[in-house]
Image (cartoon, rainbow, N blue to C red):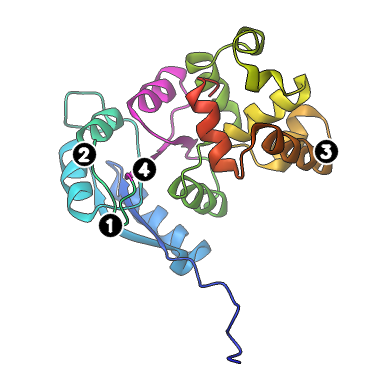
Amino acid sequence: MSPTSGMAAPRPPVRIVLVDDHRMFRTGVRAELAEVAGADVDVVGEAPDVDAAIRVIRQTTPDVVLLDVHLPGGSGNGGADVIRGCYGVETPHGEPVRFLALSVSDAAEDVIAVIRAGARGYVTKTIGGTDLATAIRRVGEGDAVFSPRLAGFVLDAFGAAAGEVAEVDEELDRLSAREREVMRLIARGYQYKEVAKELFISIKTVETHVSSVLRKLQLSSRHELTAWAMGRRLI
């Protein structure tokens, strides 16, 4: 038997395009990702403005676009213009190109604007390189990722209160109040340790609640849970 038989094949790199109007920032992000992620992330293009970004994204069809929200060009709506200009663009694997906003802004209106346009996540430029590489991979796999303090903006803009949904959603009614809290945080992109810190419970308890939520909702992954929650306007 080959010594490599039975081993999982290495994951292909996440192909990304960097969109930011500051060349030095793009250079810094590229260098940081090369250091912390190596071959796991492949930067296939860059752009400094809306029009160039749309052109590069359509030419390279990346898995993930790392996108600033304030950009010159377009109709003046920055990153949202880029996303709208790339509707229907798919990767070579037939998946939609996904967008992760990376911005210095933590203003609610900026977060909401790009999420309404179709971004899968929003993180601020204070994020570390390792966490950014993880966020890129997760968005590429279809997860929604937000800096924890920004996720509330999305919930406020798109979600409904737990009690309102529970009255009309039999599936949600299967979950306990604590399971609903955990479900929302996980679907909004929180890591287990972040959920534990937010709810003042142990990581083991978070794991137990997530397993129970997936079982009760007959789901098999965080990706399916996020899609389920988005379909009910919970995130």
Q: Give the label on residue 197, or none.
A: none
Residue 104 lies in the magenta stretch: yes
Camera-side mark, 4 or 2:
4
Name which quarter of the figure residue 201 lies in.
Answer: top right
Q: Is residue 109 above or below residue 221?
A: above
Q: Is residue 101 visible?
A: yes
Q: Is residue 36 above or below residue 51?
A: below
Residue that label 4 marks: 98
Of residue 69 and residue 225, the one placed in the foreground of this image is 225
Say which amino acid is labelled 1. Answer: Pro
Q: CA distance from mark 4 to mark 3?
A: 32 Å
**Which mark sits nearer the N-terminus, 4 or 3?**
4
Camera-side mark, 4 or 1:
1
Q: Which residues are magenta?
A: 96-125
Q: CA distance from mark 2 to mark 3?
A: 45 Å
Q: Give the label on residue 205, or none.
A: 3
Camera-side mark, 2 or 1:
1
Residue that label 2 marks: 49
